[in-house]
């Protein structure tokens, strides 16, 4: 009885606060008031969350095959379940719950599929992955500012919001914040701009966190933001001649749910028929409903009841459409897989301007390798992983027809998978920065020297990035 009563009081409060916030939505610079309202939302958002899902004894296996739809693998999935995390030329990464592991071993030993166990206790890996590493001036540059944001561990959405306001407060001449919309649970989706306000500048938009469980995306992208803002004067002219737009937390509800309840939650948290959530990166209007998406609301890859059915995808769509003619590049950051992919993701084909994207990607790969030697790959997103019809990058390229559209999938290749230790945040951030800088350099040179895209690009060794 009391449970029902307090739940309805809570929902009235949520509705009231929703109305209050709706009236200020879309304002360019958020006031402190909005910020505190937002903080309260975060608390309400947590109120009815259930017990944390545990993953004791669950394992991550790498099967040495690429035939996800072969008979033995289809049978394996039908009988024992298993969540396919990733797929590449080394094999298929699958998560198995503790209670099926022995049976899966027996079953696979009866086939010719070999495998490695990559993580032998997922819960232990989760518990260890977010142990903060020792602070340094690189991974914890905000020490002493009173802002609880660093890159030596993964932070909450709330901490990230504090960081955005820190940027606004300390670097008001180059940083601004805008709310581009609200998530299903009414968290504000923020876009941060870093720019010197030169009217000649071209725009680059980078987002992250489309999938809740891919924590490395928002962590690395906020790293890029702090690196640019705190060192703006030292940035090369190519970086300074771009209006940078960052949307580091595309799916705040899914991220917080992943932090607080189910570590491997990907979708947003909008209530659907029978099940919760839509996979945002299947909800865009290009090839919507195609391969790699599901019409089943309970599936992790549920594409939504219709194109752009979700508030989060509509938010980024609306802002991108406004940037038509001004934006030169779009990058969506996730993890894991270690690749920089260009469209298309729905089928095995490439866009008309793929040569330019391929060459710039190769250059980015070299620059990423310079950080600590990590080897990334490039190619079309379909060829590098699996089909993702309805993803954001395909829609951006198709609709805005810009030069550079990429999915940057950060580390690793399945050793830790989604549970990337916090010790790898800083280097991943540097790798993301290297990609952003490489693309900026190309845009700059095309603008400055009128170099036509892809002209003798690979032959010309005078480029200094
Ligand atoms: C939490 O409460 C809200 C509002 O009552 C509801 O829409 C949502 O489905 C609930 N979430 C869960 C996980 O039960
Ligand atoms: C981190 O700091 C502690 C305490 O100062 C020290 O004992 C430890 O060796 C440090 N760890 C690393 C990896 O540097
Ligand atoms: C700072 O953030 C970390 C990571 O989210 C958290 O564990 C810690 O409790 C926070 N510290 C304070 C003082 O809020
Ligand atoms: C190589 O780059 C330099 C400097 O931008 C330019 O002057 C030259 O024309 C380029 N050469 C070719 C073959 O594209």
Image (cartoon, helix red, strand yellow):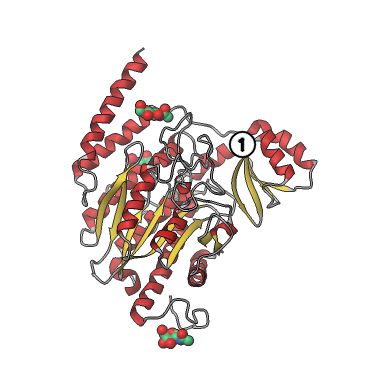
| In the image, residue 450 above or below residue 62 | below
346 displayed left or right of 246: right
Where residue 152 appears, as percent x and y from the top left, is 42, 51
Q: Quadrant of the N terminus?
A: top left
Residue, x 30% and y 24% (percent of image)? 10
120, 75: nearer the viewer: 75
Where residue 240 appears, as percent x and y from the top left, is 30, 69
| In the image, residue 204 above or below residue 182 | below
| In the image, residue 271 above or below residue 193 | above
365 displayed left or right of 12: right
Does residue 272 show up? yes
Residue, x 58% and y 52% (percent of image)? 386
Q: Quadrant of residue 226?
A: bottom left
How crowded is the residue under tag 1: few (<14 C-alpha within 10 Å), some, or many (20+)?
Answer: many
Instruction: Name the residue furthest top.
Output: 1
Residue, x 46% and y 33% (percent of image)? 276
Question: Circle 1 sits in a helix, a strand or a loop, which is it?
Answer: loop
245 displayed left or right of 366: left
| In the image, residue 57 above or below residue 209 | above
Residue at numbered disc 1 = 58
Does residue 49 show up? no
281, 120: nearer the viewer: 281
């Amino acid at each position: 009885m009391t449970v029902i009563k307090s739940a309805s009081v809570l929902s009235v409060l949520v509705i009231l606060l929703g109305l209050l916030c709706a009236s200020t939505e879309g304002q360019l610079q958020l006031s402190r008031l909005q910020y505190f309202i937002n903080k309260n939302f975060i608390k309400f958002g947590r109120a009815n969350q259930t017990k944390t899902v545990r993953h004791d004894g669950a394992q991550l296996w790498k099967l040495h095959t690429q035939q996800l739809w072969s008979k033995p693998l289809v049978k394996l999935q039908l009988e024992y379940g298993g969540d396919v995390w990733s797929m590449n030329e080394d094999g298929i990464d699958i998560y198995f719950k503790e209670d099926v592991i022995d049976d899966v071993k027996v079953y696979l030993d009866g086939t010719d599929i070999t495998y490695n166990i990559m993580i032998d206790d997922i819960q232990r890996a989760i518990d260890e992955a977010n142990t903060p590493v020792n602070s340094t001036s690189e991974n914890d540059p905000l020490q002493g500012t009173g802002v609880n944001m660093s890159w030596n561990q993964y932070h909450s959405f709330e901490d990230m919001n504090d960081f955005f306001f820190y940027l606004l407060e300390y670097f008001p001449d180059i940083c601004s914040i805008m709310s581009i919309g609200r998530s299903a649970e009414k968290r504000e989706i923020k876009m941060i701009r870093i720019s010197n306000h030169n009217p000649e500048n071209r725009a680059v938009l980078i987002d992250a966190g489309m999938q809740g469980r891919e924590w490395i995306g928002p962590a690395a992208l906020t790293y890029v933001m702090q690196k640019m803002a705190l060192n703006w004067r030292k940035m090369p002219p190519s970086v300074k001649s771009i209006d940078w737009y960052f949307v580091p937390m595309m799916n705040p509800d899914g991220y917080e749910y992943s932090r607080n309840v189910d570590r491997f939650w990907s979708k947003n948290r909008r209530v659907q028929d029978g099940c919760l959530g839509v996979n945002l990166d299947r909800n865009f209007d290009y090839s919507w409903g195609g391969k790699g998406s599901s019409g089943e609301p309970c599936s992790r890859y549920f594409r939504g009841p219709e194109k752009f059915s979700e508030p989060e995808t509509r938010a980024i769509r609306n802002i991108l459409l406004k940037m038509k003619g001004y934006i030169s590049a779009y990058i969506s950051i996730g993890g894991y897989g270690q690749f920089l992919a260009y469209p298309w993701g729905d089928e095995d084909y490439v866009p008309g301007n793929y040569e330019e994207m391929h060459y710039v990607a190769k250059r980015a790969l070299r620059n990423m390798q310079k950080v600590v030697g990590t080897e990334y790959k490039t190619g079309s997103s379909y060829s590098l992983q699996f089909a993702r019809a309805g993803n954001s990058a395909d829609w951006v390229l198709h609709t805005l027809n810009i030069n550079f559209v990429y999915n940057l999938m950060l580390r690793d290749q399945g050793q830790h998978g989604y549970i990337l230790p916090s010790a790898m945040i800083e280097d991943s951030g540097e790798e993301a920065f290297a990609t952003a800088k490489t693309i900026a350099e190309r845009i700059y040179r095309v603008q400055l020297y009128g170099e036509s895209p892809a002209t003798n690009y690979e032959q010309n060794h005078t480029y200094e990035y």
